[in-house]
Image (tube, rainbow, N blue to C red):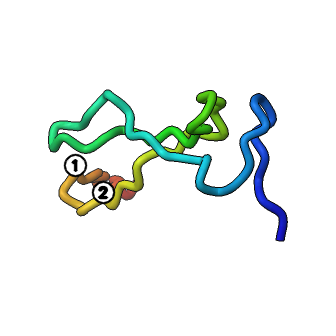
Amino acid sequence: MTEPVCPQCGATGVDQIVSTPSKEKSRRGEPWFFVAHCSQCGHIYNVFARHVIAQGTGPTLVVPERKKQ
C-alpha cells in the first residue's frame, strides 16, 4: 500500500495528516468541526462536521385535524 503524499510540500506518510478541532465551540464546549491538514505545511485535506445525535427532545409538529365537509 502506498503512503499519502502532501500535494503542497511533499511530506509522506499517514503520520503527517493530523486533525485539529475548530476554535468555535458549542454550549457544551465541543468543537463544531475538525480540520484534517498536513502537519508540515498546513495544507487542508478536508473539514469534518462534528457528529451530532439528536435526542428527540426538540419541538413537535402538531397538525390539526381537517374538518369533514
Q: Residue at x 25, y 44 (%)?
A: 30
Image height of 45 relative to 2, above or below: above
Q: Residue at x 18, y 57 (%)?
A: 57
Residue at the bottom extreme of this rendering: 1
Residue 61 position within the rendered picture, expressed as x and y whole percent measured from the top left: 29, 51
Tell which of 42 and 46 is nearer to you: 42
Using the image, tell me which numbered label, if any, was put on residue 22.
none
Question: Residue 27 at x, y = what percent?
Answer: 16, 37
Give the residue type that dot 2 points to. Glu
Q: Secondary structure at mark 1?
A: loop
Residue in the picture at 33% in, 61% down: 53
> Mark 2 — residue?
65
Q: Is residue 54 above or below residue 38?
A: below
In the image, residue 42 sits, relative to residue 34, either above or below, namely above
Label located before the other in sequence (2 or 1): 1
- In the figure, 24 relative to 10: above or below? above
Please, what is the three-letter code of the amino acid marked with disc 1? Pro
Position in image of residue 51 (x %, y %): 41, 55
Residue nearer the viewer, 38 or 44: 38
- Quarter of the picture containing the C terminus is bottom left
Q: CA distance from mark 2 to mark 1?
A: 19 Å
> Which of label 2 and label 1 is nearer to you?
1
Closest to the observer: 21 or 50? 21
CB within 8 Å, label 2 to label 1? no
Residue drawn at (24%, 62%) of the image: 55
62 left or right, relative to 66:
left
Q: Quadrant of the N terminus?
A: bottom right
Left or right of 32, for residue 10? right
Residue 59: mark in rendering: 1
Label 2, secondary structure: give it.
Answer: loop
Residue sitting farthest toward the right: 2
Q: Is residue 24 left or right of residue 45?
A: left
